[in-house]
Amino acid sequence: MDILETLDGGRDGKIKKSGDRVIRPANEWSSDIHKFLSFLIDEGFSSVPVPYGFTEQNEEILSFVLGTAYNYPLPKEFLRDQMLILSAKLLKKYHEAGTKYVGKLSGNEKWMLPKIEPVEVMCHGDYAPYNVTLIDGKPAGIIDFDTLHPGPALWDIVYAVYRWVPFTSPENPDHYDSLNEQIRKAKIFLDAYGASQEQRKELPKMMAKRLTALVDFMTSQADSGNEDFAKNCNDGHAKIYLSDISYILSNESSIIKGIK
C-alpha cells in the first residue's frame, strides 16, 4: 500500500493522498456528489476529481487532480486580468456541463447547503482560488465539491467574483485593491463568463445575500458543535464577512454602474 501523505488545505490534516488517489472523510451528501462527478466526466468535462467509491472506514476515494491550488494571501499571478478571464471561462464551462443534471434531480438528494431557487445549474458553492488547481499558471481543475447544491447560476457567479477579484472591504486581511479596481476586475470576470445585464444589476445584492447565507451557515454549524466552523468563527471569519457585506451594499450603485 502506498504511504499516505497529508494534504494541505481544510479539515486540519484529515485529507490524505495515496498514489494518485485522495482519501477524505465522507459525509451524508458524498454519494450524491460522486454521482454528479461521474455525470460530468461522462459528459466530457474532465476538470474534476474522478470518484472511486468509499472505504470501509466511511472515507471517500477520489482521483488526485493535477496542478497546484493556492490559499490567501494570493500570489501575484492570481491578481492578473488573465487569471480572472480564464477562471470565469472555466466556471462557465462547468455550469454548461452540469446543466443537464438539473433535470435528473429527484429531489431526494442530500447536499451540505440548501437548494436555492430558481434552480438553473449545479452550484459548486465554493468556486475560489483554493479550490481551483493551476497548471502552467492556468486554471485546470476544480476540487472540493462538498458545497455542491442546485441553484441559480448567479449564486455561484457572485461568490466567484467575491473570491477571485477579491471583492473585500479594506478591513479584510485579504483586501488588495481600491473599489474602482475591484469594479474593473469584476467586469472582466463577468464579461468572460458572459453574464447578462440582469445578472449584473443583481450582483451586489446577490453577493451580499450569498455572504449572509455563509455567515448564517457558519454560526449554525458552530452552535451545533462543528469544531471546524467553531474555529472559523472564533478566528473572526464571520465578522470579516459581515464587514464585506456592509462594504458591498454601501457601494451598490457604483458597482452596478461600473460592471454594465
Image (cartoon, helix red, strand yellow):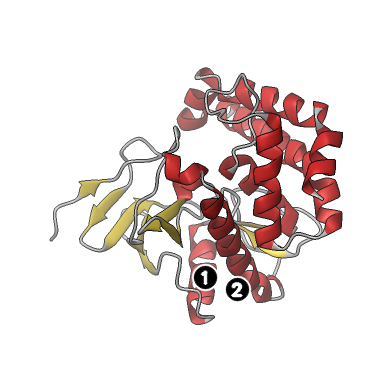
Residues packed near mark 1 inside 10 Å, few (<14), some (14 to 19) or many (20 plus): few
Q: Secondary structure at mark 2?
A: helix
Point 25% across, 63% down: residue: 20
Residue 222 marker: none
Q: Is residue 29 left or right of residue 140?
A: right
Instruction: Place residue 151 in its image quadrant.
Output: bottom right
The residue lying at 48 percent from left, 76 percent from top is 41
Q: Is residue 62 visible?
A: yes
Q: Going by the image, does 168 lie left or right of 194?
A: left
Q: Is residue 6 above or below residue 52?
A: above
Three-letter residue code for mark 2: Ala
Q: Residue at x 51, y 26 (%)?
A: 232
Q: Nearer the viewer, residue 25 or 258?
A: 258
Residue 23 percent location from the top left of the image? 31, 55
Q: CA distance from mark 2 to mark 1?
A: 14 Å
Badge 2 crowding class, 10 Å Cα cut-off, few under 14, some 14 to 19, many 20 or more, is some
Q: Is residue 56 visible?
A: no
Residue bearing the label numbered 1: 35
Picture layout, residue 196 above or below residue 259: below
Q: Position of residue 205 (x, y in %)?
A: 81, 39
Q: Given the image, on which type of amino acid does mark 1 rest?
A: Lys
Q: Which mark is residue 97?
A: 2
Secondary structure beneath disc 1?
helix
Q: In the depicted view, which residue is nearer to us: 197 or 116?
A: 197
Task: Give the x, y percent position of residue 196.
Answer: 81, 60
Residue 106, x across and y down, in percent: 69, 70
Q: Mark 2 or mark 1: which comes first in sequence?
A: 1
Q: Is residue 189 left or right of residue 28?
A: right
